[in-house]
Image (spheres, grey):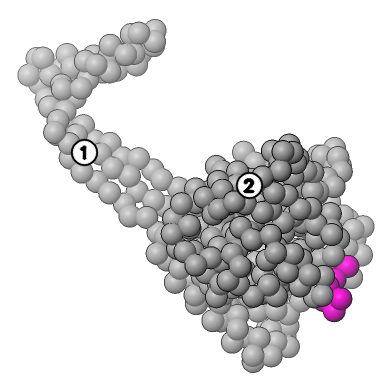
Amino acid sequence: MPQFLNTSDADFESRFTALLGAKREDSPDVDHIVADIIADVRARGDAAVIALTSKFDRLDLTPDTMRFSQAEIEAECAKVSDADRAALELAASRIRAYHARQMPADDMWTDETGATLGWRWTPVSAAGLYVPGGLASYPSSVLMNAIPAKVAGVGRLAIVVPTPNGVTNPLVLMAAKIAGVDEIYRIGGAQAVAALAYGTDTIAPVDKITGPGNAFVAAAKRRVFGKVGIDMIAGPSEILVIADKDNDPDWIALDLLSQAEHDESAQSLLITDDADFGQAVVAAVEKRLETLERRAIAGASWRDFGAVITVANMDEAVALSDRIAPEHLEICTVNAEELAGQVTHAGAIFIGGWTPEAIGDYIGGPNHVLPTARSARFSSGLSVMDFIKRTTLSQMTPQALAAIGPAAERLAQSESLEAHGLSVRARLDRLNTGDT
């Protein structure tokens, strides 16, 4: 059974604080192992990647077979049913259209001094996408990571996807094809992250690495950050549902289970202003767990990390939601749009009872790569902004430099940076002679 909390209880604050601080992930100290793997890949390149792939994935490769050939991709894609392909293509079209709207505009203007200022946006040249492999691979994650990169204008997009025992998921390759991925490598783990970051004879290095992975992948992304950019270090999935009594308890139960079935460390929370409705949702969850295919995983998540919080009113619900800063927030109330407008911290908000979070995972359009573990307080989900960077532009005229240069010289002197000030003074002196 989940925890039951009520804001009217004397011990609510201490219990809620404990809920927020609960450690939900068994993260073994793998950093020293990952450090050795990265060092090995940097030193031996392809040979290290091949040896580690044999060790961890039980797959023997050569430099020529690390990358899927075009013929292999086409053969795997041929195994995908028409219905699955159509679903992927519809999802891709919606994701592409949504992310195209995120592209920011360049801008240039001339201010009152005559200085021309502005900025422009340009894509990273190459990006690498990590895709978990084997039977647990998710083609939807391929679309969510690859399409924003392509919309941003990334020139080269490489995917690494482990294939333990040589097992390939055709849907992953089909998603990569639809998204316009340029290169696909059948490698994974920290060694794949290292190969993307530092390059080997076979794999050219990239500028940014995105995508989910296990503790080894997360540790590797932390270690290569600075050499390359990364998206985020994501933790177990989570959902918060704010719901009133005017909902079907079974719908809400399924929404909670949609995240619980991801991982035993996932967290599903319900906030409601009706205690009886909360109990009805719990009963519906227990009933669904009797037959759910992934009931062992979902049941453990719900038992260990689930919670039902009863509040006096929906203003309390919003305040608690902002403290939780959930990855996914569903608002199923009569005034859902109004409440959504009051929320400050959430990775993604799903408004109204007809908007299950699962739509966002696949086909809604917004990205499903979202901040977890309360990091929505200060970060955002994946977008085209992760694959572009801003360059500022400045151009002074003699008149503009005359207007603002003396202040720059003064500030340089205050910081004891003589050459800074002199670089401005030399030009101002030239202006004073009338030689422009």
**Quadrant occupied by the N terminus:** bottom right
Q: Amino acid at mark 2?
A: Ile
Q: Earlier in the sequence, mark 1 or mark 2?
A: 1
Residue 195 lies in magenta, yes or no? no
How many C-alpha atoms fall within 10 Å of the one at disc 1: few (<14), some, or many (≥20)? some
Q: Which mark is residue 324?
A: 2
Where residue 18 appears, as percent x and y from the top left, is: 75, 40
**Quadrant occupied by the C terminus:** top left
* Local secondary structure at mark 2: helix
Q: To which quarter of the image does residue 404 belong?
A: top left
Q: Nearer the viewer, residue 71 or 413?
A: 413
Q: To which quarter of the image does residue 256 belong?
A: bottom right
Q: Amino acid at mark 1?
A: Thr
Looking at the rendered structure, the number of numbered marks drawn on it comes to: 2
**Is 110 located above or below residue 165 in the figure?**
above
Residue 295 lies in magenta, yes or no? yes
Q: To which quarter of the image does residue 66 belong?
A: bottom right
Where residue 139 appears, as percent x and y from the top left, is: 67, 72
Q: Which residues are magenta?
A: 289-297
Q: Which mark is residue 116?
A: 1
Please tell me which residue is depicted at 31% across the width and 40% down the height of the picture: 393
How many C-alpha atoms fall within 10 Å of the one at disc 2: few (<14), some, or many (≥20)? many
Residue 262 located left or right of residue 206: right
Where residue 118 appears, as percent x and y from the top left, is: 28, 42
What residue occupies the far left of the structure in this picture?
A: 434
Please tell me which residue is depicted at 60% across the width and 43% down the height of the picture: 323
Where residue 385 appears, as percent x and y from the top left, is: 47, 53
**Is 405 located above or below residue 417 in the figure?**
below
